[in-house]
Image: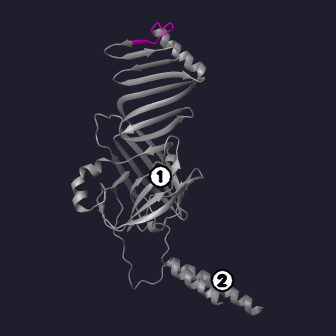
Amino acid sequence: MRRAALILVLLLLTASTASATPYWFKAGIYAKYVSRSVEDDEHPWKGDTISFNATPNEEVTYYCPHVEFTWRVLRVSGDKAQVALLLQGYNCKKRVWKELDEEAARQMLEEYQERYNFTGGNCLTIESETRNVTICEDRYAEQTEQYTVALTIAEGKGHLFNELSVPENFTRSGVIELDLKTGEFYVNGTPVGKNFLWSENPANITGLELMPGLKVEEVEMINSTVMTYYGDFNAPVYMARTNMIAGSSSKGMDVLLYDGSSGLAISFFTPFSPLWKVLGISEAMIQDTAFAKEHEEEIKNGGKMPPFGLVLAETNIDFTKPEELPEEGPSKTAIAAAVGVAAILAVLVLWRWRR
């Protein structure tokens, strides 16, 4: 009975304080994050890179000077929530790599060769004010102010490269289901990873597995004010780092920065993420460089920490944490838990007495 009574006390203590979600969580809540790159005319293809597979044999990469990511809680029902995701890139340049079988590649190359009367032998180069063209037996390249195209055939395969210099915007969107008890993300009933956009206690997320093979290995408290586009966040702030993993074309880790008071992620660099997987993105190297440059003096002289990755810019979250009233009795959850445990203990007492 002493053991059972101890269990009852522990349940009463935890039931009154446990919460599956932060105090600010509800339907309609949203947060927008921004990444801006420093303009560099000498390196026009410099900026955030976002890659996804259009088909199994075709990879598309956008190079964007301005990226925005927004999540929004659409609805909450019991311990489940539906969250919308939106990733947008502005004034992006686009590169496409496509692998072709040798027959299709050879047919395409022959069309180029016939167009420019190439009959074999040494490569033919044609230059004009509008374009430069190079034609060979196993290669074709064309460059204009608007685009660059290259086709090569080697080792029984064709490789087609297309680079568009004219800026364009792109959008990727999706909806996920979130289990508020476990933090698991689901798409059509299939688990895709764990929630990292907020945490009840960011100081205690060591071991959190964001997705298979990607786990938080270290959490460090930052005793400094962190700057964001939304505003400054005072200490404590928590920085979480994952292990290193290899992607399709790079190797890296995720780094997350949390506001210690609200538990909200205020800045994060996530080349690998379950959210990107939901949006069909294979890798996303999104790193804000404009903020630190624009606030260089304030960071240097004010002792503040600059953000990184995607940076919080807009939200309707009320960061004013409600104060607990000292006269307030046990919560309804605690009372319900107490009644339930008391009933179980009563049954145990009767069972033991009858024995």
Is 46 within the magenta? Answer: no
Percent position of residue 286, x then y: 40, 46
Residue 129 visible in rendering: yes
* Residue bounds of the magenta highlight: 116-125
Which residue corresponds to mark 1? 253
Q: Are marks 1 and 2 in contact (CB under 8 Å)?
A: no
Residue at the (38%, 51%) spot, across then down: 309
Q: Which mark is in front, 1 or 2?
A: 1
Q: Secondary structure at mark 2?
A: helix
Quarter occupied by the N terminus: bottom right
Element under disc 1? loop
Tell which of 235 and 21 is nearer to you: 235
From the top left corner, tell me how far across and down residue 231 is, in percent: 28, 59
- Identify the image quadrant of residue 171: top left
How crowded pointer 2 is (Cα within 10 Å; few <14, some 14-19, many 20+) is rated as: few
Q: Where in the figure is residue 335, as x and y percent of width and height?
A: 53, 81
* Residue position for label 2: 344
Give amino acid for label 1.
Met
Distance in Å between CA atoms under marks 1 and 2: 47 Å
Q: Is residue 318 above or below residue 142?
A: below
285 on left or right of 303: right
Question: Is-magenta flag for residue 119?
Answer: yes
Identify the coloring: one colour
Q: Residue at x 42, y 65 (%)?
A: 220
Looking at the image, which residue sits at the far front? 122
Q: Is residue 138 left or right of residue 255?
A: right
- Which residue lies most toward the right here? 355
Residue found at x 57% / y 20%: 104
* Left or right relative to 165: residue 344: right
